[in-house]
Image (cartoon, grey):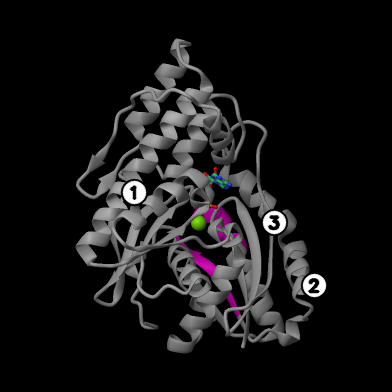
Amino acid sequence: MICLGIESTAHTFGVGIMDENGKILANAKDSYTTEQGGIHPTEAKNHHIACKDKVVEDALKEAGITMDDVDLISFSQSPGMAPCLVIGMEKAKELARKYKKPLIGINHCIAHLEIGRKLCGCEDPVMLYASGANTQIIAYEGGKYRIFGETLDNGIGNFLDGFARYMGMGFPGGPKIYSLALEGKEYIELPYVVKGMDVSFGGIQTNLKQKYDSGKFSKEDLCYSCQETVFAMLVEVSERAMAHCEKKELLLGGGVACNKRLQEMCENMCKARDAKCFLPPNGVLVDNGAMIAWEGIIEYKSRGADKIDDLDIKPYERTDDVKVEWR
Ligand code: AMP
Ligand code: MG
């Protein structure tokens, strides 16, 4: 079985093609970026409209197949920015109708977890999902992917991008903060905000902006201190979730998980508690179509296709709204 998956929750229009053994046949994408400022939903939507046909073509070409070889189409139905989600869904419906293929809607967060499980070969991990809009600590318990901790305000990526934007850098800011942090020497104390199993970034953002405006601290030291602080918060709650659920595996997901310092801190924590840390390749950490295709295959096998006419986007669906019938 070959599945073509379409991702369009936010900045990236991605088309991935997977076979049922978990082989990535293609993972094409086009991402909206800016020189200055963050993601404007209407501009991101227009970006997706402009590139969608080309990205589908690119993926088919990369896989060396035609639509006739595709057995199933999947798309990211939730959660995400509604104007962006609609474009992916409409493209998926158009292809499903034109080529008479079954269609299935997928939860983006769960797709991150399942592609990680497949590619890394881990069984039953706690996932630290650190992306632009989402920051969640997720683990499988009692038939669902439960959220054991999460951000109470911004996602970590949006937080990092917001601070980068404040310093005059465009989107995405995460990689720029990472590079500046490498040059940082002095740790500047920042608020450390863990509440129970949850984290919050709003107060840290304000504090960082005030410190930046004071002119007393270098960008490099601020970026370094920012990363050390907020990543420590994520590692703390991930570790507590692992202890609580008695799980011995940590899986990373989301674009911010590409950050080498976050990866290192997670690996150190796992080593200290005799657990294993799994780092999927960057191509599936960031938003991508391959994970949507893979999740399409495993969900189709357990619950079959959705009815095309009934399908709509679910911008606010939560990870634990989905009944996990395939495990
Ligand atoms: P996602 O929404 O999962 O695609 O993640 C997007 C977030 O990941 C943005 O906030 C980016 O700044 C961040 N990001 C993407 N690539 C990297 C990277 N190589 N290093 C650090 N952060 C990154
Ligand atoms: Mg994501």
The residue nearer to you, when weighing 276 against 197, is 276
Residue at image mark 3: 49
Q: Is residue 258 above or below residue 163?
A: below
Closer to the N terminus: mark 1 or mark 3? 3
Look at discs 2 and 1 and give the one toward the viewer.
Answer: 1
Give the quadrant of residue 230.
top left
How far is mark 1 from mark 3, CA to CA?
Answer: 38 Å
Magenta residue check for 316: no
Closer to the N terminus: mark 3 or mark 2? 3
Res 153 visible? no
Q: What amino acid is at disc 2?
A: Lys
- Disc number placed over residue 61 in the picture, else none: 2
Give the quadrant of residue 142.
bottom left
User: Where residue 158 sits: x, y (%)?
Assistant: 47, 41
Q: Which residues are magenta?
A: 73-87
Closer to the N terminus: mark 2 or mark 1? 2
Q: Is residue 49 shown left or right of residue 127? A: right
| Circle 2 crowding by C-alpha within 10 Å: few under 14, some 14–19, many from 20 | some
The residue nearer to you, when weighing 246 against 162, is 246
* Number of numbered discs overlaid on the protein picture: 3
User: Where residue 148 sits: x, y (%)?
Assistant: 26, 58
Look at discs 1 and 3 and give the one toward the viewer.
Answer: 1
Residue at the (62%, 51%) spot, across then down: 45
The residue nearer to you, when weighing 80 against 248, is 248
